[in-house]
Image (tube, rainbow, N blue to C red):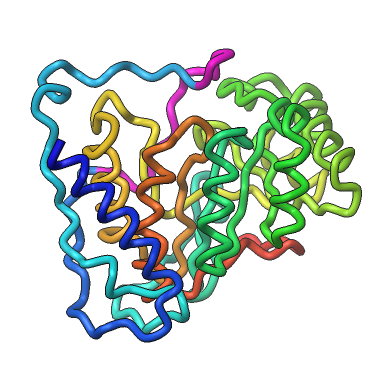
Amino acid sequence: MTARLALAAVVVIGLAGCTSAKPDPVPSATPVPSASIVESAEPSAEPTPTGEAEPQASPARSQAPRPPRITTPPIALNCTGSQPSDRPQAGGAGPLGTVKTTGNTTVALTFDDGPDPVNTPKVLDLLRQCGVKATFCVNGVKAQANPTLIRRIHNDGHTLCNHTWKHITQLGDYGVDLIRQDLTDTNNAIRAIVPDARVPYFRAPGGRWTADYLSVCQELGMTPTHWDVDTRDWESSRWGKGESMVNHIVGVVQGQTRPGSIVLMHDYQKPDTTTALHTALPWLKARFTLVALPRDGLPKP
């Protein structure tokens, strides 16, 4: 009970940092150690009617959750501007030459697999409070089922990205005709809700890129977009849920984000990601310029 109350206090205090006009000076944050692999892919399991299949955390983890490891006092951070970072700039291309960085010192937050009727509004609220724009990689079937959220994502100034109709991870092996139909259906579902929306990016489910994906992206005028930082916020079998997952996500963000990074998170059925943003957003905003991927697309590296 004491640990949960402490985490709740950190969440409230961390978000308060987004509106603090004059924070107290604090030393640089100490990155939380993480075993995450930057270039790793999302899970291969296809979504079920109730969400992505996720193994439950082991009993040992549930009985003995790790204590909080966030060392930076979030109250001292604010969302009013960025500070210079001495970290090396992210560079290079992703798998098969896909884009994995912004191409400059800005950092882009991306949220996959939504929209989610519960968590996406909370993520949008946090982004609005911190004055941050992001990129939402949406599935066509979920966009069609949640038109109000697609409108809000677009109207709030965020960028939309095509993440296939139903997140079938093997789609890249089905041939260009089926891929083209899937991606076109997804774009059409988005534009049926927001006719003036551009969908300039595509992200392959699970990061499983194929040459056929790249061919269809070129044909449809979309930039194939990978990532530089993978929070692996879906991997509850390894990181658990609740406090341990929140600490893991914050640790990856603090330990791996560099100028130019594209950061992968999920808004679909990931409440721990939403909680982690209360700490991660102020921390990021104090160190980097956070942007949505431009609506007119990014050049390939």
Residue at image point 40% right, 43% down: 273
Residue 30 seen in the figure: yes
Residue 263, how many percent across, how many down?
45, 54
Residue 294, how many percent across, how many down?
68, 65
Residue 25 vs residue 117: left or right? left
Quarter residue 12 falls in? bottom left
Quarter residue 149 falls in? top right
Residue at image point 37% right, 39% down: 272
Residue 301 seen in the figure: no
The relative height of residue 95 versus residue 283 in the rendered view (above or below) is above
Residue 37 within the magenta-colored segment of the rendering: yes
Residue at image point 51% right, 61% down: 101
Residue 188 vs residue 53: left or right? right
Residue 188, how many percent across, how many down?
86, 36
| Relative depth, front residue between 224 and 43 | 43
The relative height of residue 80 versus residue 68 in the rendered view (above or below) is below
| Relative depth, front residue between 284 and 169 | 284
Residue 115 vs residue 108: left or right? right
| Relative depth, front residue between 53 and 63 | 63
Residue at image point 61% right, 54% down: 135
Quarter residue 261 falls in? bottom left
Residue 70, how many percent across, how many down?
19, 56
Give the quadrant of the C terminus.
bottom right
The tally of labels here is 0
The span shown in magenta is 36-51
The relative height of residue 57 versus residue 119 in the rendered view (above or below) is above
Main SS of the magenta segment? loop
Give the quadrant of the N terminus.
top left
